[in-house]
Image (cartoon, coloured by chain):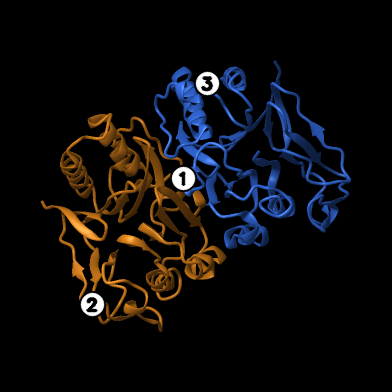
Chain colours: A orange, B blue
């Protein structure tokens, strides 16, 4: 099983603390040695860093841990390969442009019968069930909405129905973002926490590191972190329900869809 | 004026030597302080690193200089902004997926009347003439060839005609790649060199660094480097002609189109 990490914040925020704990699962405390990747949305721009090598050994991962890139949405993924070889082309997150927005996607789980999902605008570059499902999902959204709908909730509602169809094919835990919103969908495992004033101290479950967020924040900051498993052991994470889609913006939940 | 750097090789090759000289132009010996980026094609996969900060100050650029990523195609760009703000979203190279291939593009020059180029499948995320021209170019290729043509030369010929149209709008020096081929098109400035056995020594024009390629290669290696200006001062670089398109694969020129 792969591991997912996401962030939504109302101010540009670095993910160094959470990423440090997350990294340890990439061949350190966890079995996920088959590559990793992380994507940042910064000031309207997008970039990702991907490496097919274990994250604990990766000089690129060390750079990301030590070089604070401040962004308002982050998506990260550590891979344990099931479908598709260990190679760069199969390393999450995946990205495609739609409506002039860079969409970014990472998936945890395994699907059956994914080859039959029909493709239209977007085609996979690699050989994973995950990227195929992403291309199908994006193609279905684009077919339904050649232009972004004025009422966002129409898009979110369709996204939820598409996620439900993928859940019918197996395990589909999802992080998806369009630069403004972060979408998280749960089949089996996703947990989230929202940090806001008064900020306290947090300590990582996977590494000996604690941080006092009060020293790094202003009273108006709202920062939410979403992960496969809670990353800290002294905070109350909320576990998502199977079939639940949450829509995040600026660290807050803006939409919630259930089975 | 921005600077371009490309590589085509028949074996996975790192670009550390050329990139070291190129980096110095990013705010060191050159005036190009408005961001930089580099893209690698490795074993069928694609990744790029982009930074809106000057390359001489960039920890990401230092990583790329010191961490040999071996690939068979590289495209790199250092930006001096003319159209579009200095921000990540306007930082080359740009990428889009077509036919299940990751296409990568970097442009040097400035265009007039680019806003009128009609868009179809692909839309720009940022505000540059460069990305708009890229989206137009890719859209025209995809409209002409919904599937990749069996005869590659039909694609190359159309690409040359499209480049000629862009040259009609101003300065359009281009590096473009699809993972198998590297395309270079010249309006004003592009020079190339092909290194093969017997390999000799090369010394950078922009930094005090020399390398003896014989120590790093096998007799069958063929490595071509393409840049806005020659990067070494003791080798014979070939300058491209205005209106010339070269198609590279495995370090060799496979197609040549002229005005």
Neighbourhood count class around disc 3 (C-alpha, 10 Å): few under 14, some 14–19, many 20 upward: few
The front one of A257 and B59 is: B59
Under circle 1, the secondary element is helix
Is B150 displayed left or right of A221 in the figure?
Answer: right
Q: CA distance from mark 2 to mark 3?
A: 61 Å
Residue beneath the point at 55% across and 42% down:
B93
Residue A8 seen: no
The quadrant of the image that shows the N terminus of chain A is bottom left
> At x 71% / y 18%, what residue is drawn?
B258
2 and 1 marks in contact (CB < 8 Å): no
Q: Do the residues at pointers 2 and 1 share their chain? A: no
Residue found at x 65% / y 44%? B72
Q: Is residue A251 above or below residue A57?
A: above
Distance from label 1 to label 3 (Cα)?
32 Å
Camera-nearest label, 1 or 3: 1
Determine whether A1 is above or below A213 in the image. Answer: above
Q: Which residue is mark 1?
A: B89
Q: Which of the two labelled residues, at mark 1 and mark 3, occupies the earlier sequence position?
A: 1
Q: Position of residue A148 (x, y in %)?
A: 26, 35
Q: In terms of depth relative to the viewer, which is nearer, A159 or B135?
A: B135
According to the picture, the residue beneath numbered tag 3 turns out to be B149
Q: Secondary structure at mark 3?
A: loop
Looking at the image, which residue sits at the far left?
A259
Q: Position of residue A209 (x, y in %)?
A: 40, 82
Is disc 1 in the same subunit as disc 3?
A: yes
Left or right: A187, with B57 as reference point: left
Q: CA distance from mark 2 to mark 1?
A: 34 Å
Which mark is drawn over residue A198? 2
């Amino acid at each position: 099983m792969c591991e997912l990490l996401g962030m939504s914040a109302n101010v540009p925020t670095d993910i160094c603390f959470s990423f440090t704990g997350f990294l340890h699962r990439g061949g350190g405390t966890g079995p996920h040695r088959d590559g990793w990747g992380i994507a940042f949305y910064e000031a309207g721009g997008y970039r990702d860093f991907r490496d097919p090598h274990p994250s604990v050994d990766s000089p690129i991962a060390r750079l990301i841990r030590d070089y604070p890139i401040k962004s308002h949405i982050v998506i990260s993924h550590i891979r344990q390969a099931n479908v598709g070889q260990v190679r760069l082309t199969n390393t999450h997150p995946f990205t495609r442009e739609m409506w002039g927005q860079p969409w970014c996607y990472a998936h945890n789980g395994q699907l059956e019968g994914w080859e039959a999902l029909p493709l239209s605008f977007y085609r996979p570059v690699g050989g994973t069930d995950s990227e195929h499902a992403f291309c199908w999902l994006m193609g279905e959204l684009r077919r339904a909405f050649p232009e972004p709908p004025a009422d966002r909730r129409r898009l979110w509602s369709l996204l939820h129905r598409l996620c439900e169809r993928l859940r019918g094919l197996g395990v589909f835990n999802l992080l998806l973002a369009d630069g403004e919103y972060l979408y998280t969908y749960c089949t089996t495992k996703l947990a989230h926490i929202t940090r806001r004033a008064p900020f306290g101290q947090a300590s990582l479950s996977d590494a000996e590191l604690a941080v006092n967020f009060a020293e790094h924040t202003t009273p108006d900051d709202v920062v939410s972190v979403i992960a496969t498993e809670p990353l800290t052991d002294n905070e109350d994470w909320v576990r998502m329900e199977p079939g639940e889609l949450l829509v995040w913006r600026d660290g807050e939940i803006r939409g919630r869809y259930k089975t």
